[in-house]
């Protein structure tokens, strides 16, 4: 298969390129950011996309969001997510975004290269393959609204719970204050906090975090 690979760790990205080449697949592009993933996929029209979740520019769920956007334009595009993070809300959105094969593997649970390549072939052939540990985590607390948040949104919410301002959160996470505001808006939406309680939504979000 012709593969576009997105992974921000240079060492892992190079290892995956060598692995896929060894098993006679063609990596047409190996990129490190979500923007490069979108561009390379549009340019090369691969048979499958393999992507991490947490990638530049924001180091949140950028890789997965890029895959979802690509699926909207090309519903037949198989996508295999390889990550150490579980993002249930984004995974559900990815599964709904097209009728092609979909996979979600946790990096530390992939036993060997042959297993990974076999899973990629299944996904490329139209199958859905979800790591059992991902399913277990999502089913453990199915009603927990915090499961809807990305890893970076949870970091932002944790700092909000410590009483940090947007500017302080941005300094701690090395992101812009505008990006912090976007994350907080997304947190409000995912936690179903109504817009008519604007003055209290920050407090309500923190309470949801502390209860979780």
Image: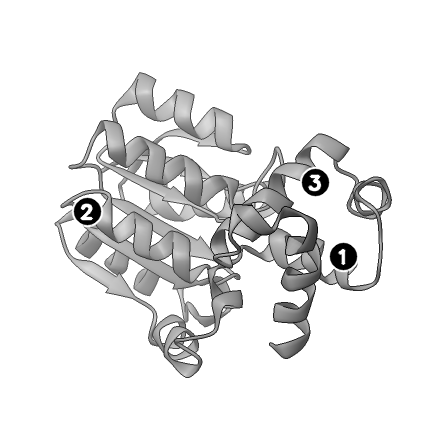
Give x and y (percent) for residue 129: 24, 63
Side of 50 relative to 102 (left or right): right
The numbered mark, 1 or 2, whose residue comes first in the sequence reads 2
Q: CA distance from mark 2 to mark 3?
A: 36 Å
Give x and y (percent) for residue 33: 54, 32
Residue 2 to residue 51: above or below:
above
Name the residue tied to disc 2: 124
Residue 206 to residue 184: above or below:
below
Q: Secondary structure at mark 3?
A: helix
Q: Quadrant of residue 45?
A: top left
Side of 200 relative to 130 (left or right): right
Name the residue tied to disc 3: 180
Give yes or no for contact between labels 1 and 2 (Cβ–Cβ under 8 Å): no
Q: Dot 3, crowdedness within 10 Å: few (<14), some or many (≥20)?
A: many
Q: Which mark is residue 117?
A: none
The answer to which of 163 and 22 lies nearer the viewer is 163
Residue drawn where x is 32% and y is 50% of the image:
93
Does the rendering let one see residue 1?
Answer: yes
Tag nearer the camera, 2 or 3: 3
Side of 157 relative to 75 (left or right): right
Does the rendering let one see residue 9?
Answer: no
Q: Dot 1, crowdedness within 10 Å: few (<14), some or many (≥20)?
A: many
Give x and y (percent) for residue 201: 64, 54
Name the residue tied to disc 1: 160
Q: Quadrant of residue 66?
A: top left
Q: CA distance from mark 1 to mark 2?
A: 41 Å
Give x and y (percent) for residue 128: 20, 59
| Quadrant that contains the N terminus | top left
């Amino acid at each position: 298969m012709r593969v576009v690979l997105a992974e921000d760790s240079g060492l892992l990205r190079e290892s995956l390129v060598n692995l896929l080449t060894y098993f006679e697949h063609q990596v047409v592009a190996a990129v490190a950011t979500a923007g490069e993933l979108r561009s390379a996929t549009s340019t090369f029209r691969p048979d499958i996309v393999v992507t991490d979740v947490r990638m530049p520019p924001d180091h949140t769920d950028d890789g997965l969001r890029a895959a979802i956007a690509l699926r909207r334009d090309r519903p037949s595009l198989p996508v295999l997510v390889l990550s150490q993070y579980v993002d249930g809300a984004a995974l559900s959105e990815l599964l709904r975004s097209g009728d092609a094969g979909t996979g979600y593997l946790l990096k530390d649970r992939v036993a060997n290269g042959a297993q990974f390549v076999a899973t990629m072939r299944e996904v490329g052939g139209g199958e859905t393959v979800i790591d059992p540990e991902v399913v277990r985590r999502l089913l453990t607390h199915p009603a927990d609204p915090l499961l809807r948040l990305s890893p970076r949104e949870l970091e932002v919410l944790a700092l909000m719970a410590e009483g940090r301002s947007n500017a302080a959160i941005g300094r701690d996470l090395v992101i812009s204050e505008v990006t912090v505001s976007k994350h907080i808006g997304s947190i409000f939406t995912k936690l179903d906090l109504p817009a008519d309680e604007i003055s209290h939504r920050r407090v309500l979000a923190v309470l949801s975090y502390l209860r979780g």
